[in-house]
Image (cartoon, helix red, strand yellow):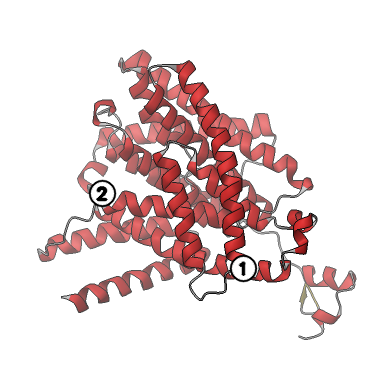
Amino acid sequence: MTNYIILALCVIVLLSYLFDITSRFSKVPGVILLIGLGIVIKLFVNMLGLRIPNMQPILPVLGTLGLVLIVMEASLDIKLEKKKTGMIIRSVSSAIVLFAVFVLIATYFLVKFKGFSITSSLLNTIPLAIISSAVAISSSSGLKAEQREFIIYESSFSDIAGIIVFDFILLHHGSVTEGLFSILIKGLITTVLAVVVTSILSILLHKTTYHVNYVIILTSVVLVYVLAKISHLPALFLVLVFGLALSNNQFAEQSPVRRYVDFEKFRSDIESFKRILGELTFLIRSFFFIMFGYYTRTEGLLNFDNIVIALIITAVIFIIRWIFFTRVLKMPAIPLVLFAPRGLITILLFMSIPQVFRLQLIGEEVITLVIFFSIFMMMTGNIMHRNEPVQVINGMQNRDFIDLAEGDIESKMDF
């Protein structure tokens, strides 16, 4: 039995790797294929009459780990530069404004026309308003650098804003004034904590020579994240600050710290850390979405009422997004408007809603269908996206020709 389990795990990892590779060419997000694989495995298990232990309680654990690792990986790719100020402002405003508008519209409808309480309506609509960084970031690799950075900022801040507001509603629905004061204090505490943790872990990354190093740093980040969550602090903000501090170490290089830090070695350590982080993220994300697909109730996905509700929710999400991008941001709509998938964070927050606040109108099947439809829209955006044509001049691509014109001749003569 042990050998069969190991064999199954190896096959799953290899299939996930194959999905990840083929998604770059087929434009079909690997997430769809992973969830589909989970559903197929469930059908196969039922057909053979196999008995599989209930691993559903592990799903939130994998989801939380995946969220931390994905946000950290994304933040390590972000470079803060003055010329990007406008893009950062647009992406953050997009995340916050679109989140707020959708929640207000959906909550008004549920309270006014369905008679649900404000608290229940808010808690059930907030997960649907959040862009999943786990899905969006991993699926944006084929976009241009500036578009990918926009998605990284927007989805990360959408996660952060959504989690903060969700916790605020869940814990302080009785007193708004008390809740606002509490969230302000917690924000300040988290900022200070983020600076301290980042400093300690950066020193650990740079100075430790023991062969077990990166795993300890990752474990420490997850530990601090969990402790912050237990304390009801905006823990994802802490992870984002840690990654941003590492990826933008050039600012520290201009300070007195440069006397004690070998920045060449430090950057080399960060690159090694990123490679290990990327591979671990791939594993966690793969197993999470396969398990999610396995425990999806397929009969509920075919229910007509659920399909209609999910289509309406998805349509509202993208209509609001289209209007905001074209009328407010004055940005090209394609493909960024379509990159607003729901996914891991939506599932995690929905699982966190107390049973007393659950709405039958928005069940697990509706959530799953919204995730499918929004990911399908993102897939459409990937297919519609076309890279700029690359001209070939005497066997060289145009970007190579530009590099030669700028004097970078020696590095190009090696070919």
Residue 410 coordinates in the image, percent (x, y):
85, 81
Tag 2 secondary structure:
loop
* Residue 99, visible in the rendered structure: yes
Q: Residue 207 carries which label?
A: 1
Q: Is residue 50 above or below residue 342?
A: below
Q: What is the CA distance from the residue labelled 2 to the residue labelled 1? A: 46 Å
**Residue 383 left/right relative to 231:** right
Assign the C terminus to one quadrant of the image. Answer: bottom right
Residue 54 position, x and y percent, is 18, 55
Q: In which quarter of the image is the N terminus?
A: bottom left
Answer yes or no: is residue 151 visible: no
Residue at 57% in and 74% down: 209
Mark 2 crowd level (few <14, some 14–19, many ≥20, 10 Å Cα): some
Q: Can you identify the residue that label 2 sits on?
A: 296
**In what element is the residue under mark 1?**
helix
Instruction: Report the residue at 41% width, 32% height from top.
Output: 313
At a point 57% along the width and 29% down the height, the residue shown is: 97
Q: Where is residue 100 in the image (x, y as percent from the top left)?
A: 52, 27
- Which of 155/182 is in front? 182
| Left or right of 279, for residue 286 | left
Q: Where is residue 404 in the image (x, y as percent from the top left)?
A: 86, 74
Foreground residue, 10 or 367? 10
Nearer to us of marks 2 and 1 is 1
Q: Which amino acid does label 2 sit on?
A: Thr
Report the amino acid beneath label 1: Lys
The first of marks 2 and 1 along the sequence is: 1
Residue positioned 37% across, 73% down in the render: 14
Q: In which quarter of the image is residue 268?
A: bottom right
